[in-house]
Image (cartoon, grey):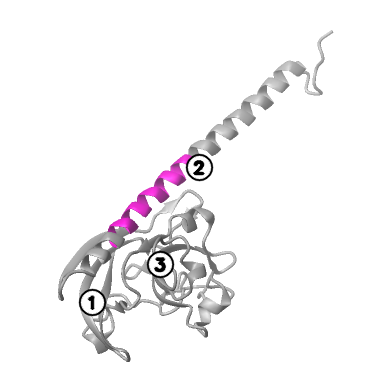
Amino acid sequence: MRFRSQSGAPMELVIAVIILIASMTIALKLISDSGEAQCISEVKAEVDKLKLAMQDLALQSPPSKRTFYFHMPKCGETSVDVLRFVYYNSEQYCRACPGHYAGCWKMEMASYDPDGQKLTQGTSLMQNSVCIDIAGEFTVLDGSDTSIGGQAWDPATGLGCLPLGVNPCPVNEFDSTNPFSCTASTSGVPTNLYTGSDSKASFSTLGRWYASGATIKRTRIFKITLQKRTYHGLGGEAGAIAVCAQPVEN
């Protein structure tokens, strides 16, 4: 006796189709995950180039420079929307950085969740954060800050540098029709790091930027120039690296 489904097809055929669909679903998921992992790995390679450039510049004399093109792609379900230069003044955030205990520099990536209107850092992006082997006395300067000799971005001429956020969020909006409000709950980091009240972290944050005249299309490619400088702060003269990011419309 052959069993038939309610549609009249042999039960063996129904089971075979179910198995085929399940197999294809699993295969497509594996392909998607593999592609996403490769994409994020390529972004990590670009972050590593920035890291090595910063470490090299730390040993150079002003006004040495290094210039790179940096891409913030959408990798499968993960969109790279933010790049942070962070100094952590606490060993609990420096355990992944060999030789750094009291403090450390890192570069981290984050995504923007338009539904929740917040920044997130999933496991894949967190795992691809990099430690920068430079001294804690160094300072990352905003290349758009005119008070230190920088030049603000002028979309009309394409000259100057985009401003960097001084907290975990970038200065720019992610959606001009639905502005992003940066708070402790939307920044994607613990409250004590967002507020900086206990000086456990300092941020210089770059985010995706609107191309000239665009409303939906956003810039994912940047020309980033790192320049060695000397910074005169409250503690006296110290080494610094100015970050100038210019959007490349694509």
Question: Would residue 183 be found to the left or right of residue 6 on screen?
Answer: left
Majority secondary structure of the magenta segment? helix
Q: Nearer the viewer, residue 5 or 152?
A: 152
CA gap between label 1 and label 3 equals 34 Å
In the image shown, does 82 or 56 lie closer to the viewer?
Answer: 56
Q: Amino acid at mark 2?
A: Asp
How far is disc 2 from disc 3 in space, using C-alphas?
33 Å
The percent coordinates of residue 38 (x first, y second) are: 41, 44
Residue 33 badge: 2
Which tag is nearer the camera, tag 1 or tag 2?
A: 2
Viewed as shown, does residue 116 lie left or right of 45?
right
To which quarter of the image does residue 82 belong? bottom left
Crowding around mark 2 (Cα neighbors within 10 Å: few <14, some 14 to 19, many 20+) is some
Q: Secondary structure at mark 2?
A: helix
Query: What kind of element bears circle 3?
Result: loop
Magenta-highlighted residues: 34-50
- The residue lying at 24 percent from left, 62 percent from top is 53
The outermost residue toward the top is: 1
Crowdedness near tag 1: few (<14), some (14–19) or many (≥20) residues, C-alpha within 10 Å: some
Residue under pointer 1: 160
**Residue under pointer 3:** 100
Image: 72 above or below 103: above
Q: Nearer the viewer, mark 1 or mark 3?
A: 3
Q: Residues within 10 Å of mark 3 (few under 14, many from 20)?
A: some
**Residue 124 visible in the current orientation:** yes
Residue at x 49% of width, y 53% of height: 124
Helix, strand or loop for disc 1:
loop
The disc, 2 or 3, on the residue closer to the chain's N-terminal end is 2
First of labels 1, 2 by sequence position:
2
